Amino acid sequence: MKGYLGETKISIHATTAQDFGYTDWQHCWIQQYGGIDGEHHKDWLIDQCLRISLGTPVEVYLARWENGAEETRFRLGEPSAEYLKWVDDIEWSTGIAP
């Protein structure tokens, strides 16, 4: 879209996802990315769900365009200490984001 103004990080409490738990966020990621073909993309999705389940925070951004359009975007923050400890003990593929 033309006229992209960029993203601003917002509070999760400003969204309908304010009461989401780990399972809700995993479902969100699976719904959005589960249909994308490719083993490397599936590895990425599994890794994202593991990160969520081990406490990696979800960050929320609001993207805006000149015409007034807005889009809420979700992505994961820095990996939690629990996730880093878990993957340190095994051979693990983080895959490739779609």
Image (cartoon, rainbow, N blue to C red):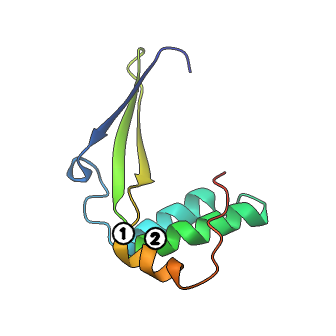
| Circle 2: residue type | Arg
Q: Nearer the viewer, residue 55 or 19?
A: 55
Q: Nearer the viewer, residue 44 or 63?
A: 44
Q: Quadrant of residue 46?
A: bottom right
The residue carrying mark 2 is 51
| Circle 1: residue type | Ser
Helix, strand or loop status at disc 2: helix
Q: Nearer the viewer, mark 1 or mark 2?
A: 1
Say if 15 sits above or below 21 in the image: above
Q: Would residue 38 be visible to someone looking at this image?
A: yes
Say if 49 sits above or below 65 in the image: below
Q: Is residue 3 left or right of residue 56?
A: right
Q: Quadrant of residue 79?
A: bottom left
Mark number, residue 14: none
Q: Would residue 55 be visible to someone looking at this image?
A: no
The residue carrying mark 1 is 80
Q: Is residue 14 left or right of residue 5?
A: left
Contact between labelled residues 2 and 1, with CB atoms less than 8 Å apart? yes
Q: Nearer the viewer, residue 91 or 65?
A: 91
Q: Is residue 35 left or right of residue 28?
A: right
Say if 62 sits above or below 24 in the image: above
Q: Quadrant of residue 91?
A: bottom right
Q: Earlier in the sequence, mark 1 or mark 2?
A: 2
Helix, strand or loop status at disc 1: loop
Pinpoint residue 10: horizontal percent, then vertical percent: 26, 42
Image quarter hosting the N terminus = top right
Pinpoint residue 11: horizontal percent, then vertical percent: 23, 47
